[in-house]
Image: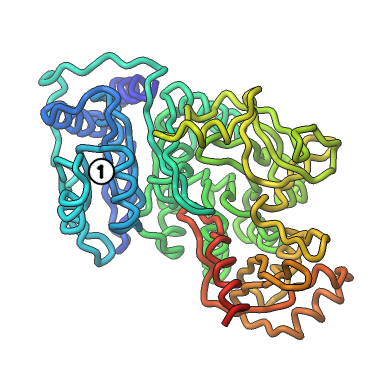
Amino acid sequence: MILDDLDRHARERPGERALVEVSADGSVRELTWAALENESTGVASELLRLAVLEGEPVAFQLPNRLEFVTIALGTLRAGAVCEPLMPIFRERELEFMLRESAARVLFVPDTFRGRDHAAMAQALRETVPSLEHVIVLRDATDFASSPSETHFPALSPDQHAQLLFTSGTSGEPKGALHRHEVLDRAADHHIEHFGLGTDDVIYAPSPLAHQTGFLYGMWIALRLGVPLVLQEVWDAEIGLDAMRRFGVTFVQAATPFLADLTSVAEERGETPERLKTFVATGAAIPRELARRSRDVLGTEVGGAWGTTESCLGCAFAPGDPAELAWGSDGHALDGVELRVVDDDGRPLTPGEEGNFEVQTDCLFDGYLNRPELTAEAVTADGWYRTGDLARIDAHGYVRITGRVKDVINRGGEKVPVAEIEQLLHGHPAVRDVAIVAMPDERLGERACAFVVGELDFETMLDYLDSARVAKTYWPERLELVESLPRTPSGKIQKFILRAQARELVTT
């Protein structure tokens, strides 16, 4: 279990670097393994003093700082459940999630990025009846203490370790529960798949309050006993400097992080010299970006697919041919089976598009307080219904083609949204793009393209025409926007764009 790993690292190499925090101004704080064990134990002692019970959720809304890790580990040592909350959440999201979990304890920073988190959290005590204790953090050593002061409960692998609310790509978030043994197993599969070892250095620019940062940043670094480099606020200039300074070898983060890092490395003519692997998750990698990133960064770049509920299901592997690494979402990890089925649940043949389902030994334990949604998400024979559409080729490589709810049905013809988006990504005037359905009286739906860039409608059509795309699949409206709405993990929130498209038609 993860606390056993921590105790072993602290015992065997107490003075070695465990955590690095790179702040928004580029300054650095660090913790050794001994300090990490000591401070997380102090958090656990404080939680027991507040009468936190085994299995009780402890909420913390923190950026990527040292305190996030010490509080997460302290929560687990107290026998409680980690409930990380994204720093971007405001009163509406926080009130919903804290009510749902009935958390009694909430950790927050005093301020972060100009927002008074302390005041916001105190106000939540008036609207969330369960919330008794708001702890405002100002220093990572607030809870340093001696391990001998408190008796901690014995933990079992089947106890819950994490309550993580989904990002809400399609509406109201749901709280997914994971057990210790599942997170350990998911981390071990990940380590094996990517060939990680004790000489690696893990970099986490993604929020630790999201599964990408929590599991594929913090948890794998703790399992391996290697340094974890955190970045408080994403800035590609500071990020590149940190990766070079601390010898980062592995990064898993959303596609926008890759795009920004590649641009800065290209402009400066500098690379993160020890970087071996960049795994891009959250959204498909535009193929042109993947090729450019591989050349500029001098590292392997590829795609992967996972969810909060299932952990990582498939990914490219080191040594995969480049076109497969970035032209697909990879193949199944150990312990995972993948299938594509029709709407009646019948398996489809290789290459056919259908509903993507996963059977894994890293599946979540269910949605908090929502057994009916858990039943909808998991089939009777134990397959998780992802809500994605996909094709799996004869060699087991997966291509996610869209979301079931994102399908555009234009007069009976289904528009291949992911394919058209990939094509438009290749246009030099396009920085980002998403295509969604807009209602149409005659055809039912037509395609609307939301583009970040300087593209005009006629140029878009000429470009698709030159690519020999069937006219039925051409977007019939173009909206230029400053940015696309995304979840913290980088997934585009198409339900927001669909609502905007409906407004465009009706106004």
Q: Position of residue 494 (x, y in %)?
A: 58, 61
Identify which residue is drawn at 48% across, 34% down. Answer: 199
Identify which residue is drawn at 13% across, 25% down. Answer: 146
Residue 445 quadrant: bottom right
- Look at the picture and state if 180 lies above or below 372: above
Question: For the residue marked with disc 1, what is the amino acid?
Answer: Glu
In-front residue for pair 415/40: 415
Tell me if residue 335 can be seen: no
The outermost residue toward the front is 441
Identify which residue is drawn at 50% across, 60% down. Answer: 486
Q: How many marks?
A: 1
Q: Position of residue 275 (x, y in %)?
A: 54, 48
- Please state if 64 lies on the left or on the right of 302 as rendered: left
In-front residue for pair 186/83: 83
Identify which residue is drawn at 48% across, 56% down. Answer: 487
Residue 377 quadrant: top right
- Please state if 39 lies on the left or on the right of 272 as rendered: left
Q: Position of residue 439 (x, y in %)?
A: 67, 70
Q: Quadrant of the N terminus?
A: top left
Tell me if residue 306 can be seen: yes
Count residues near mark 1 (Cα–Cα under 10 Å), then give few for <14, some for 14-19, many for 20+: many
Q: Quadrant of the C terminus?
A: bottom right
The local secondary structure at tag 1 comes to helix
**Residue on which the image places disc 1:** 67
- Please state if 151 lies on the left or on the right of 22 as rendered: left
Q: Position of residue 419 (x, y in %)?
A: 76, 60
